[in-house]
């Protein structure tokens, strides 16, 4: 029996990967009984890959929207010379890693500044309850999928966005 993994990527067609084979062992009548211990002990599972992380390497060119701020040397933002608010690329230690990940996983990164050019704090005021500024606000509002620059982990931020990758620790 073939084993398939089916997964989807952000609105793209679902992928169907043959990831292994289950073979029930033995030719006797007991091998047809799924509750038989001799059937189970002589059965085998052969996986073609080491797990999902080894098979999910093609995101099908999906767009991943990254919000960025200029923060050398981690992220140097390259802007359109005719329109300084349009980000055309990024470079720097963290950004180069993000671009390499895009090439490895086959996604298309796009970059943008938060309109207020802020990192992200909760907006004060009765009418602004639960609203955030900056990059954090873009993540919460669904205007960005990730940040491609260092964003300090604070208790307040960690209550509204997920932090997945911890690259370095700075002590202030």
Image: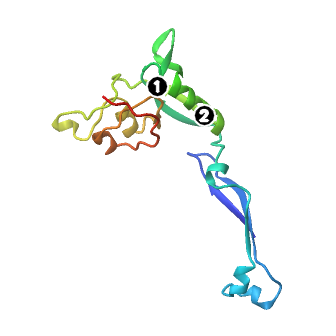
Q: Residue at x 66, y 43 (%)?
A: 58
Q: Which image quadrant for residue 84?
A: top left
Badge 2 element: helix
Query: How many numbered discs?
Result: 2
Q: How many other residues sit within 10 Å of disc 1, few (<14), some (14-19) or many (≥20)?
A: many
Q: Residue at x 34, y 28 (%)?
A: 119
Earlier-in-chain disc, 2 versus 1: 2
Q: Furthest residue to the bottom?
A: 29
Give how far across and how far down residue 88 sits, in percent.
54, 19
Q: Furthest residue to the top?
A: 82
Q: Which residue is mark 1?
A: 112
Give how far across and how far down residue 104 sits, in percent.
65, 36
In what quadrant of the picture does the N terminus appear?
bottom right
Image position of 78 with respect to 143: above or below: above
CA separation, marks 2 and 1? 16 Å
Nearer to the camera, 44 or 110: 44
Image position of 31 with respect to 161: above or below: below
2 or 1: mark nearer the eye: 2
Left or right placement of residue 6 versus residue 126 in this view: right
């Amino acid at each position: 029996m073939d084993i398939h993994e089916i997964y989807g990527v952000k609105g793209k067609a679902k992928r169907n990967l043959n990831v292994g084979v289950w073979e029930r062992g033995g030719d006797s009548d007991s091998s047809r009984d799924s509750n038989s211990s001799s059937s189970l002990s002589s059965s085998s599972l052969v996986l073609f890959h080491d797990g999902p992380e080894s098979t999910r390497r093609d995101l099908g060119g999906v767009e991943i929207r990254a919000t960025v701020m200029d923060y050398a040397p981690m992220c140097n933002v390259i802007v359109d010379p005719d329109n300084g608010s349009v980000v055309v690329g990024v470079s720097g230690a963290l950004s180069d890693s993000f671009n390499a990940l895009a090439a490895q996983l086959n996604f298309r990164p796009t970059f943008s500044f938060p309109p207020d050019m802020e990192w992200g704090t909760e907006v004060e005021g009765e009418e602004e309850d639960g609203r955030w500024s900056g990059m954090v606000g873009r993540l919460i509002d669904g205007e960005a999928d990730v940040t491609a620059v260092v964003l300090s982990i604070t208790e307040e931020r960690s209550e509204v966005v997920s932090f997945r990758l911890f690259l370095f620790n700075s002590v202030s």
